Image (cartoon, coloured by chain):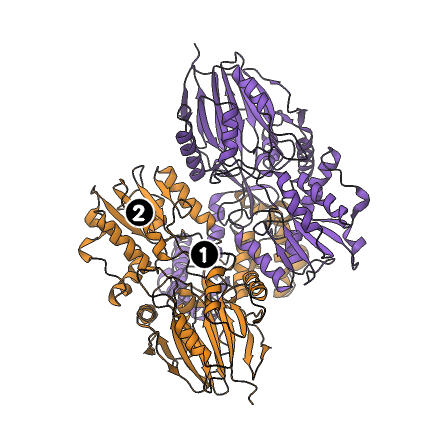
Chain colours: A orange, B purple
Amino acid sequence: MKNKYFSVLPIGGVEEIGSNMTLIKTDNEQIVVDCGMLFPYEECFDINYLIPDFAQLDASKLTSIIITHGHEDHIGALSHFLKAFPDAMVYATKFTLHLIQKKLEEHKVTFQYKLYEPDSELNFKGVDVFPVHVNHSIPETCGLIIRSKDKHWGSLYISDFKVDLESKHEAPIDFKRIKTLLSECKQTAYFLDSTNILNDGKTVSEGELRTDLKSLMERDEDRIFITLFASNVHRMTAIAKMGIASGRKIVIMGRSLKAYMESAFETGHSDIPTDHLFQPDQVKGQTGKMLVFLSGCQGDFLSALRRFSFGEDSTFKPGPADLVVFSSKVIPGNEKKIYRIYNKLTEFGATIITASDHLIHASGHPGKEDLHMLMKNFTPNFYFPIHGESYFLKKHYDFIKESYPNVKPYLIYNYEEVVLGEDSVKIEEHEAKEPRLIHGKALEIEKTQVSQRRKMATQGAVFISYHKTMNHIEITTLGLPLMAQDLIENLKKKLLEQIRKDLVSREETYFKDQVKIATRQFYNNFLGYKPMTEVHLY
Amino acid sequence: MKNKYFSVLPIGGVEEIGSNMTLIKTDNEQIVVDCGMLFPYEECFDINYLIPDFAQLDASKLTSIIITHGHEDHIGALSHFLKAFPDAMVYATKFTLHLIQKKLEEHKVTFQYKLYEPDSELNFKGVDVFPVHVNHSIPETCGLIIRSKDKHWGSLYISDFKVDLESKHEAPIDFKRIKTLLSECKQTAYFLDSTNILNDGKTVSEGELRTDLKSLMERDEDRIFITLFASNVHRMTAIAKMGIASGRKIVIMGRSLKAYMESAFETGHSDIPTDHLFQPDQVKGQTGKMLVFLSGCQGDFLSALRRFSFGEDSTFKPGPADLVVFSSKVIPGNEKKIYRIYNKLTEFGATIITASDHLIHASGHPGKEDLHMLMKNFTPNFYFPIHGESYFLKKHYDFIKESYPNVKPYLIYNYEEVVLGEDSVKIEEHEAKEPRLIHGKALEIEKTQVSQRRKMATQGAVFISYHKTMNHIEITTLGLPLMAQDLIENLKKKLLEQIRKDLVSREETYFKDQVKIATRQFYNNFLGYKPMTEVHLY
């Protein structure tokens, strides 16, 4: 009798949405599943992204990393991972690999890889891993069935999926394979997506969007602009073909849309007839029917959508004859940025259509009905909600507890290792590490330094230098209101007085500290806050 | 025949939600309606709030300011206004005046006021103003009917309202007064609230919340925590009385809840029996049924709700036996802050109830059905959507255009003056002024200075001083990653070399500029961005 078959240890992605990384551990091997980035939770001042900490990864045991799909929250930290573990074998499907290769080329990182198919079998030292085709919002998304060699334990791990029975682009989630492979096991567990658990019903199918999207493409407006999540290359292909059928020229603007479409073309996921594709300058100033794709549906600052909406694009300016379609949803936290875009477009007179007006967006995550469908196909013994903030994990946990009394759900967070024993599971807690902050040229910046940035941003900064023999003081302020600059002469007088009285013969550190304290107090009296202050002494 | 009876000039509140201020102008008088604050739209680094610019206000003509209700976006800039126009007469109802008085005491601003009632008549030089009782989410909210002395023109101005036929606390909006007063006019216009125009139906009544709120109060949990918008003292009173009926002790935590309730008690808007009210330390460590009100339903950083949810309150810690009720909605932009609170509470094991789970929140703004009810009561000739971002104004405009072909709607923005002529209106544009940024001790800070703060926040800062005769250089960095500090010795060497070669004999400005450029370039090579740099020279 064994007390551990294998274990599943989430490093990121449970507790938050993003930075997905999970360890599959056996006694003599570590297999990583995904390595994604997280976008900053609160204002972090130009921190580009966060990555999971690698402290739990053991280079002597780590052999492989399996990528489930090509979203940034699953592949975005790969360049950092591969710098730390250059010998790891990367497993990915064709489309996902294409995205990874382009990304790592940019970072000048080389790596070794093996392609897998949704019906492959990947054999490792202590476990076998079976990818399973699932539906999501990017092509070639896979779940993973992880089984102990003796088939005693089988786990289904799907961080992102939905059940889509009506897509025109891909088969429905492979229920049969899940059932077949797990039915052979004595003990089974699900690790499943919590993103859409607040949706009581069934997630809309991509196929259901066709009617409304088609009728929009057939509208009278000459120019239709449309934005959507760039990775949804199937939807984009469908829309482009509807546009062509309505006699529209197709223009694609924005780096991320072009990059995803390039991968889609090269791996057979898009068949837009290229003779209908035009560069912006080929149609500049033209009238006639066109359909312009714009990246940046979340209102990102440098995106094509934002530039266009603010009237800053050199080819297209929004006007009263234009239709602007948002085939997307607002990710929580982006409301203000997106409303700003709605407002700007409105002020230019354009007509806006969103997913509140028509059925033109479908989520890629399961509602409760999707989960019921999966549970009906095969019901496991144990159940672990993943991929969601704590509140969502708990809602997911409650849902399973109420709906499936024979299934044992657990509420786990990052750094809680699920150890699969003979006929039970055990949760082992590890010391949680904060994700690491990445900025600038993909470099780490420490939390203490970000907190200095925050202080300067909210309280300004003062730079003082003092020359003893000249008895001269110089003061520069940054980020203080102009009235504070008018006070500089007063501050100089005050500081010189204090230096003469108390400081002139004191040692350097004490001298600097006292000048700093006096300066911060001086501004506090006027402004109500204390600027960061640095002192140089000669 | 006159070509101007009076005009209506919005300074703030049209185009954005907040900083409401509108000018009523006749040839020889200016009357201001409301003077509110706006919360920063994008990240502004501890800017507390924005206020409308007063450039359009003419001290020689400005006699009065009428306040429609006591929300911060209508009274929050009053202290600034009254410092600039100390002779203006403030008109307000009893409850609103109480709120204003407390606010201005804090700012040590004195002012003269006249109380008005919802059936008063306020006579000015060129117009008469008739307040009208409306429903909203704070007691004593009024719309204003503004009529020319000869009754030729009558305008109804309601920036915030809903139609509530089932409140237990106040009468429904006074349709009869609106109809009576406007029916006497030849030309009429509406200026109405766009906040909830995306709601096709009828806004929920406060009365409709009673069933679900009551059943929550009757639940088994000993401790119920509840948060709501502090200004909704009627709802708070209703909930407190339900709690008392269920045998609960009542505790109120948080500055804003206490302040609004104090005004409510003193003006007869709350009748919670005070012998059921307890201070936190009176119930600390007690078991038994209690109901604790927490301010901060938007997740504000220093609020009682956030402190409690993060386990930082000294009296109450959240636990698995607790129920936490959000009788509120998420204002767009606050999603992340509020989800963070849900997550923290979940991690402590508390049960969360929101307005998605039960009918426990009602908006204070009109859905389309509310607007239909008002239009059915009396239909004006002209119509101006106000109180909303551009996108909402446009939706409101479209709605009126489609539903009421005999009414002429106009899309106006801030600084567009609606001039009411004989039988037509004319829009006169004025130079738009940006709202002013207020920070620290209620002081203005300039945009240029905020932009310096942003630069330091995103790129860090470097302070350099150089002493010529000693040939000594000192460098301090703030907000740069630690690796950048390791580079300081390299930078010193590089700068000293450049100084020796090119700069030693150059004049001060050139010298400083070159050191600055070299430093910024040096860091750019390593980090990918250029820190703000200041140089002192001796």
Chain to which the residue tagged by mark 1 belongs: B
In the rendered structure, the answer to whether residue A33 lies left or right of residue B124 reads left
Q: Residue A297 appears at what percent x and percent y?
A: 38, 52
Marks 2, 1 in one chain: no
Q: Along the horizontal axis of the image, is A153 left or right of A224?
A: right
Kindly identify the amino acid type of the residue bearing the numbered disc 2: Phe
Q: Residue furthest left?
A: A275
Tell me the CA gap for discs 2 and 1: 39 Å
In the rendered structure, the residue with mark 2 lies on which chain? A
Helix, strand or loop at disc 1? strand
* Residue A89 can be seen, yes or no: yes
The secondary element bearing badge 2 is classed as: strand
Circle 1: residue type = Met
Q: Report how many numbered discs are placed on residues in the image.
A: 2
Question: From the viewer's perspective, is residue B397 above or below residue B128?
Answer: below
Instruction: Report which residue position mark 1 lands on.
Output: B532
Residue A225 marker: 2
Is label 2 or label 1 in front? 2
Residue at point 46%, 74% (across, down): A156
B137 vs A21, left or right, is right
Left or right of A447 in this view: B206: right
Badge 1: residue crowd in 10 Å (few <14, some 14–19, many ≥20): many
